[in-house]
Amino acid sequence: MKGYTKPITLIVIILLIDQISKIWVKLNMTIGESFNVIGNKVLIHFIENPGMAYGMEFGGEYGKLFLSVFRIIAVCGIGYGLHYMIKNKYNRGFILNVALIFAGALGNILDSAFYGMIFSESTYFEKATLFPAQGYATFLHGYVVDMLYFPLIEGHFPSWFPIWGSEHFLFFRPVFNVADSAISVGVALILIFQKRYFKEEHQESNNLHDEIRED
């Protein structure tokens, strides 16, 4: 288990925070309900997303099924890759970043796979209940719960601005969840530190080749 402790711990922590926050929102808020955390710039705003991350959708019932199956295949691939990287002693930072991506992807799969079966439907007027006589959707057709909303900057483009002149803008518009955040942070850190990560792997590969030649 050497080398697995930190990645597994990180995955478990992300999944716990993600699922606890989603279940709390699902049971305590109605669709569209929100409350301020820090002024009007950091909000908890409950929506459900039948598609991809950050509120994007992937058309229709078959599109939803395809997306759920694709997610499961992707998570299996990421999980195998993570195991391979740990076994072959890749850069620890890189491994933890991949663990973040794995945890985030798995967190959203849990929503899609099981929430439709264990929750009643959330509406604009009623909160969901846990373990109803009949859930709101079948296996792999559940909705992903989103609740983190950061409308940091709002205003209008100047009249002289190309294309969007005088139009209203809002940054940051998407509503997302902890799982989405984990994926985004993992990908961003890999992009930022990729030279360091892959430089070390290249050096280790060269050292291994040198040892083989000496033997």
Image: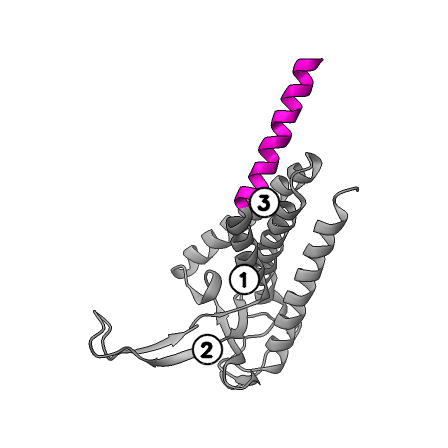
**Crowd around label 2: few <14 · some 14–19 · many ≥20 (10 Å):** few
The amino acid sitting under disc 2 is Leu
Instruction: Give whichever of discs 2 and 3 has the lower sequence position.
Output: 3
The amino acid sitting under disc 1 is Asp
Name the residue rendered at 64%, 48% in the picture: 93
Instruction: Give whichever of discs 1 and 2 has the lower sequence position.
Output: 2
Reply above or below: 187 against 200: below
Q: Percent x, y for residue 173?
A: 42, 73
Name the residue rendered at 59%, 69% in the picture: 135
For residue 152, the mark is: 2
Residue 90 inside the magenta-drawn segment = no
The answer to whether any part of residue 77 appears in the image is no
Reply above or below: 83 against 161: above
Q: Nearer the viewer, residue 23 or 211?
A: 211
Q: Is residue 55 left or right of residue 140?
A: left
Name the residue rendered at 42%, 56% in the picture: 63
The answer to whether any part of residue 36 appears in the image is yes
The amino acid sitting under disc 3 is Ile
Which part of the image, by quadrant, shows the C terminus? top right
Q: Percent x, y for residue 62?
A: 42, 55
Residue 127, quarter of the rendered image: bottom right
**Mark-to-mark CA distance, 1 and 2:** 18 Å
Q: Percent x, y for residue 198?
A: 56, 38
Closer to the observer: label 1 or label 2? Answer: 2
Q: Is residue 105 left or right of residue 50?
A: right
For residue 78, the mark is: 3
Which part of the image, by quadrant, shows the N terminus? top right
Residue under circle 1? 180
**Crowd around label 3: few <14 · some 14–19 · many ≥20 (10 Å):** some
- Magenta residue span: 194-215
